[in-house]
Amino acid sequence: MLHFYDRLEIVSENKIIVRSATHDDLQPVAKIARITWDATYHHTIAAENRHEFLERAYKIENLAPVVNAAGHWLYVAQLNSDIVGFGHFLKRYHPSKSRAELVRLYVLPQYQNLRIGKTILETGFDALARANITQCFVSVQSSNTAARRFYERHGFTFKDTHGQFLGTQIITLAEYVRPITAKDLLNASNS
């Protein structure tokens, strides 16, 4: 296993590329979801519930419609030729506000805390700003303190908690919201 400073050196020597996902990326996306879900939720979500959710949510035929679809922004983070993380933003209907939700953001455990998630977020926020989206929501399991701190560091503020069925159990989710503004444009001269 690589230590933090070894991983940081690998990332600094090799550029992380965040790009729009293609259909060829869906298999690695599903694999990353399985690995990160097992690492993150093995103490809080029963194995059979994790398995059932992942099998349904990450079937290639269920992921394929979001690639290049209007109102969806699906990105992969690539280090060298390896996909090490992904994020999925989704435009949400609201009668008077332009809103989106970050529905997926996962980075392989050995590549976490290396600014990959931050880079995915910044790329997504840029796309949302260009699409005139004014708010981005995210829900995270309440007990996932590392994820909650991550979102708070990146401008999300706590809004509410709610329960949700996941298989045979109810999990508590913390909902966060973040404004999307012109400051989120990565290269304002190209806007």
Image: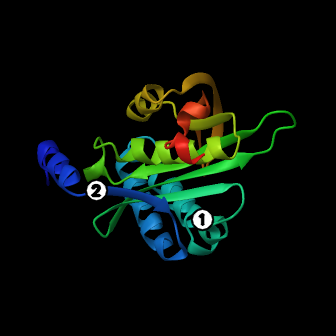
Q: Which residue is mark 2?
A: 15
Q: Which residue is mark 1?
A: 56
- What's the residue type where badge 1 is placed? Arg
Is 10 left, or right, of 80 in this rendering? left
Q: Are marks 2 and 1 in contact (CB under 8 Å)?
A: no
- Quarter of the figure with residue 31: bottom left
- What's the residue type where badge 2 is placed? Lys
Where's residue 176, x and y in %? Answer: 59, 29
Where's residue 59, x and y in %? Answer: 57, 70
Q: Nearer the viewer, residue 13 or 32?
A: 13
Q: Is residue 155 visible?
A: yes
Q: Secondary structure at mark 1?
A: helix
Where's residue 100, x and y in %? Answer: 68, 42
* Disc 1 packing (10 Å; few <14; some 14–19; many ≥20): few
Residue drawn at (56%, 58%), measured in percent from left and top?
A: 74
Mark 2 → mark 1, Cα distance in angstroms: 33 Å
Question: Number of numbered discs present?
Answer: 2
Instruction: Name above or below for residue 86 compared with residue 42.
Output: below
Residue drawn at (42%, 27%), measured in percent from left and top?
A: 153
Q: Secondary structure at mark 2?
A: loop
Residue drawn at (34%, 50%), measured in percent from left and top?
A: 39
Comes first in the chain, label 2 or label 1: 2
- Quarter of the figure with residue 146: top left
Q: Is residue 173 visible?
A: no
Q: In the orientation shown, which residue stands out farthest toward the right?
A: 95
Is 160 left, or right, of 122 in this rendering? right
Quadrant where the C terminus lies? top right
Q: Any mark on residue 71, and which?
A: none
